[in-house]
Image (cartoon, rainbow, N blue to C red):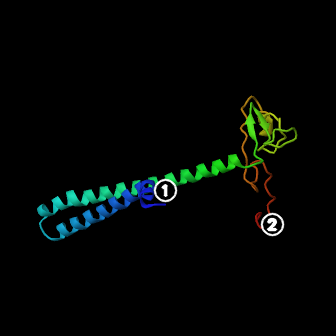
Amino acid sequence: MDLMTRVRSQWDRLTAAATGVGGAVALIVGWHGVSGTPYPAEQLPYLASAGFGGLFLLGVSTALWLSADLRDEWRKLDRIEQALRAADGLGTFEAGRVVGASGAPGAFGPTGAPAGTPVPAAYAAPAPAPAEHGRTAIATAAPAGAVPATAPKPAPSAEDTR
């Protein structure tokens, strides 16, 4: 890859590096100007111009670098998605039905359900228990090993009854 192609593809990182160096130089110049005089009236111009300008340039540099990293991640995700679409054996959803990659009867789709199974049935979850006394039932999944709220309490030991 030649230099110009690399520069065009990494323009945001190069700009981030340049603004980062510019921000650091501005902060050093500001510090040098402030440290050269004991009078606050002579220090304020350095603080206002070089100090705040340097911090602003460092902020721009950080934003550009993070933007470049995010763009790289999106490119990587696009490549993964294209590879998955091109891979053999993956089914698709067509007209509300699971269709195998070959489309033949008996082929299995991405859910593991036989081809031709309606999509809602392929992803069917168990129905919630009926509500008592007209209240709405809310289905929740408890973590593995969790004790239900209605579990019987253990019998007290001899030490607990003293």
Residue at 41% of width from left, 55% of height from top?
11
Residue at 21% of width from left, 64% of height from top?
30
Q: Residue 158 — which label?
A: 2
Residue at 63% of width from left, 52% of height from top?
80
Q: Nearer the viewer, residue 2 or 48?
A: 2
Q: Nearer the viewer, residue 29 or 133?
A: 29
Q: Which SS class for mark 2?
A: loop
Give the class, few, some or many, for how many residues have Cα within 10 Å of label 2's Cα (few <14, many ≥20).
few
Per the model, the C-alpha gap separating discs 2 and 1 is 63 Å
Q: Which residue is mark 1?
A: 69
Q: Position of residue 116 (x, y in %)?
A: 83, 35
Is residue 114 among what the camera can see? yes
Up the image or down, 16 lies above or below 131; here it is below
* Residue 118 figure quarter: top right
- In the image, taking residue 79 as reference, residue 123 lies left or right, namely right
Q: Nearer the viewer, residue 9 or 119?
A: 9
N-terminal label among 2 and 1: 1
Is residue 124 among what the camera can see? no
